[in-house]
């Protein structure tokens, strides 16, 4: 996929880029390699895990991708295994116990597959009593088992990065564009950026964050959040109590069925959490009756719709299902086409699964527990049932194509054009626009409610711990629809690129264009809603006394009102917080818990009648200039009838300044 290099540039020549490039995907769990002929030439460090593991900013970016897309346990196990190679005998014993508790213990949240010989040995002996040579051998053997999965994850990252679908790209560019000096060598720059990325990861699941922070400490990367995140005495372990199961079990394929008398309902309820985690199909059982906690996510479970049961199992790859002789007869370009079609199908499957998690693990139990009102639920999860139906139907149509064509899809253009074009496309756009535009508000409401309501917070934490969430938090799942929209144009363009039939190719490209129009419309709706939310917060947090002083512009002398402002962008906070509105730039400073307007002066004492720098800058009189001595700074020059004024604004990073 080629992007127009001249598509849209900001004041300093920064790309505003394709809308799909600015939003990170989260729901993909499948990606076949060799979608493009071009290798990853964006950064040499992503060639192998051994190259990557000593470069903290690049490694953290990869870890973020893995957390969003895969089970991070194999990668974290591999990295921690690497720490054991050069330890002394005393350090080996201490660190092996931690390694065991983190990755090998049967109660470890980040447990990986352990060879039977090692598992049997650990069952017979306490880990700290094993000989040093045995401990090192166990770590080496377990680490080696993770190599294949880590390589697969790294290959997926390289492919997704070429498509603009990986996190922390601005931070990586900040590192890669840095010109090393004696004062700030490249190593220092990378650690500094890594510390910022790591602090942003502090809201990740506790066990994952602790594992990442521990490895980063080895690389010299510090975090302010680690002490508050890690618990005492083995932060990866979860206690497993003994539970007696007076139940008989029958196995039908991969589906677990319980047989028990109705008198044993209470026993069933007491072990639902364990049953739930054992069921490969993710069956959820109804738990009606007295004694169930209204704030507990585990007992308040609901029967999953039969049509959603298949989504707990990853679908087989097309190569596994198609006739071998048919696959061997395909040309290289057609194989690539089938890979991308398979990717479209597999990621749609993953998306329906994630939406069903949002519905069955969060929305419906919240409604049943009366922790949110009907209006609040409708605003936080708008049109969720309809959106699930829409994506489920699209998935079913793709599945039907695969079966009809023997898993080698001949024509897909009609299916995708029906989905994204015409009246169906308009309906798709309407539903997704409403859903996506509410996500910022929804995330704010959830965060606020968790702080204020212990019952609600307890419910959310229990729900997020379920295996169906795959270590994602609710704040990671809510944006899934927006993230999915960004993938469609990329996938369809890649299908068209490898399609030889002219008419088929043209109709697929038309579908991709429909997707781009939908995405652009939804982006505008999202921006509009975010602007309204920002303006709402702007009204709330600006100290009222500010407007008693500055109700009239201190330099122009013209009255202004917040209701007349048209917000377009909110920049990151620094010592001065910049707010870019439709017709003015406002500079705010924090005073206690309020944001205030404050005139700036070169003198530390304000003198009446002295020319002061205004905190409100009219954009129709502004022009900008770069600061030759500082890539993170720029001048804001503006003029009034009383003369010219100038601010030098310094951002925290080069990327922030460009933004």
Image (cartoon, rainbow, N blue to C red):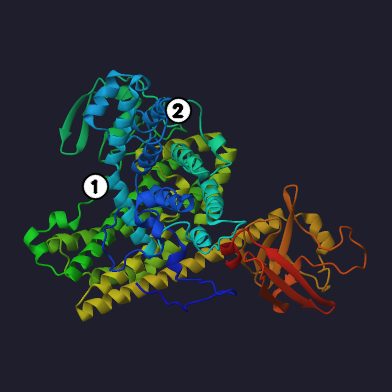
User: In the rendering, at what x and y percent does residue 583 appear?
Assistant: 68, 73
Alpha-carbon neighbours of circle 2 within 10 Å: few (<14), some, or many (≥20)? Answer: some
Q: Residue at x 30, y 31 (%)?
A: 138
Judging depth in this view, the residue of 649 and 243 nearest the camera is: 649
Kindly report which numbered mark, 2 or 1, lies closer to the viewer in this rendering. Answer: 2
**Sequence order check, earlier mark of 2 and 1:** 2
User: In the rendering, at what x and y percent does residue 53 appear?
Assistant: 41, 48
User: In the rendering, at what x and y percent does residue 196 appear?
Assistant: 55, 50
C-alpha distance separating marks 2 and 1: 36 Å
Alpha-carbon neighbours of circle 1 within 10 Å: few (<14), some, or many (≥20)? Answer: few
Quadrant in the rendering for residue 157 = bottom left
Judging depth in this view, the residue of 552 and 231 nearest the camera is: 231
In this rendering, the count of numbered labels is 2
**Residue 637 visible to the viewer:** yes
Q: Residue at x 30, y 76 (%)?
A: 509
Q: Which residue is mark 2?
A: 234
401 relative to 369, above or below: below
Q: Residue at x 26, y 28 (%)?
A: 118
50 relative to 115, above or below: below
Residue positioned most to the left: 325
Quadrant in the rendering for residue 432 = bottom left
Quadrant in the rendering for residue 252 = top left
Q: Which residue is mark 1?
A: 310
Q: Residue at x 57, y 37 (%)?
A: 453
Quarter containing the C terminus: bottom right
């Amino acid at each position: 996929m080629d992007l127009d290099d001249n598509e849209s540039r900001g004041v300093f020549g920064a790309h505003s880029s394709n809308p799909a490039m600015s939003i990170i995907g989260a729901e993909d769990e499948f990606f076949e390699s060799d979608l493009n002929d071009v290798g990853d030439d964006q950064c040499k460090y992503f060639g192998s895990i051994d190259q990557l593991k000593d470069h903290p900013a690049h490694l953290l970016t990869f870890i973020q991708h893995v957390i969003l897309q895969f089970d991070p346990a194999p990668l974290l196990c591999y990295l921690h295994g690497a720490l054991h190679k050069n330890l002394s005998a005393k350090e080996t014993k201490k660190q092996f116990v931690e390694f065991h508790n983190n990755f090998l213990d049967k109660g470890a949240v980040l447990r990986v597959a352990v060879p039977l010989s090692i598992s049997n040995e650990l069952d017979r002996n306490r880990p700290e009593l094993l000989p040093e040579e045995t401990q090192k051998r166990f770590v080496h053997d377990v680490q080696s088992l993770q190599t294949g999965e880590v390589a697969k994850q790294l290959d997926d990252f390289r492919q997704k990065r070429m498509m603009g679908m990986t996190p922390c790209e601005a931070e990586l560019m900040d590192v890669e564009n840095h010109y090393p000096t004696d004062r700030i060598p490249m190593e220092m720059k990378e650690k500094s950026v890594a510390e910022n990325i790591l602090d942003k990861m502090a809201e990740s699941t506790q066990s994952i964050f602790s594992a990442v922070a521990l490895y980063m400490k080895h690389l010299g990367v510090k975090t302010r959040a680690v002490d508050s995140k890690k618990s005492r005495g083995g932060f990866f372990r979860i206690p497993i109590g003994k539970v007696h199961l007076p139940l008989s079990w029958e196995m039908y394929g991969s589906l677990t069925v319980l047989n028990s008398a109705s008198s044993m309902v209470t026993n069933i309820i007491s072990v639902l959490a364990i049953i739930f985690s054992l069921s490969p199909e993710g069956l959820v059982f109804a738990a009606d009756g007295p004694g169930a906690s209204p704030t507990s996510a585990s007992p308040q479970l609901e029967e999953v719709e039969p049509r959603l049961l298949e989504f707990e199992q990853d679908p087989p790859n097309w190569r596994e299902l198609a006739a071998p002789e048919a696959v061997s007869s395909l040309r290289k370009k057609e194989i690539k086409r089938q890979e991308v079609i398979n990717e479209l199908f597999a990621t749609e499957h993953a998306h329906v699964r994630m939406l069903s998690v949002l519905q069955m693990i969060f929305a419906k139990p919240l409604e049943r527990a009366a922790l949110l009102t009907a209006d609040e639920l409708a605003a936080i999860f708008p049109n969720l049932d309809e959106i699930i139906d829409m994506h489920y139907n699209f998935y079913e149509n793709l599945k039907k194509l695969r079966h009809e064509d023997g898993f080698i899809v001949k024509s897909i253009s009609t299916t995708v054009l029906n989905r994204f074009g015409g009246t169906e496309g308009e309906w798709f756009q309407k539903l997704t626009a409403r859903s996506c535009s509410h996500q910022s508000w929804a995330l704010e409401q959830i965060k606020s409610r968790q702080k204020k309501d212990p019952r609600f917070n307890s419910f959310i934490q229990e729900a997020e711990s379920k295996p169906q969430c795959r270590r994602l938090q609710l704040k990671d799942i809510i944006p899934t629809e927006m993230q999915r929209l960004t993938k469609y144009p990329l996938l369809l363009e890649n299908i068209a690129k490898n399609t030889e039939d002219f008419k088929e190719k043209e109709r697929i490209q038309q579908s991709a264009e429909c997707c781009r129009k939908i995405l652009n419309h939804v982006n505008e709706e999202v921006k509009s809603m975010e602007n309204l939310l920002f303006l709402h917060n702007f009204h709330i947090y600006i100290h009222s006394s500010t407007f008693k002083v500055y109700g009239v512009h201190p330099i122009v002398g013209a009255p202004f009102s917040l209701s007349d402002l048209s917000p377009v962008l909110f920049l990151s906070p620094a010592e001065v917080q910049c707010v870019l509105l439709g017709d003015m730039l406002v500079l705010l400073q924090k005073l206690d818990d309020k944001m205030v307007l404050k005139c700036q002066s070169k003198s530390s004492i304000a003198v009446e009648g002295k020319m002061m720098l205004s905190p409100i800058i009219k954009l129709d009189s502004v022009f900008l200039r770069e600061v030759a001595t500082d890539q993170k700074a720029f001048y804001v020059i503006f003029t009034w009838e009383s003369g010219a004024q100038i601010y030098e604004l310094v951002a925290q990073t080069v990327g922030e300044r460009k933004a």
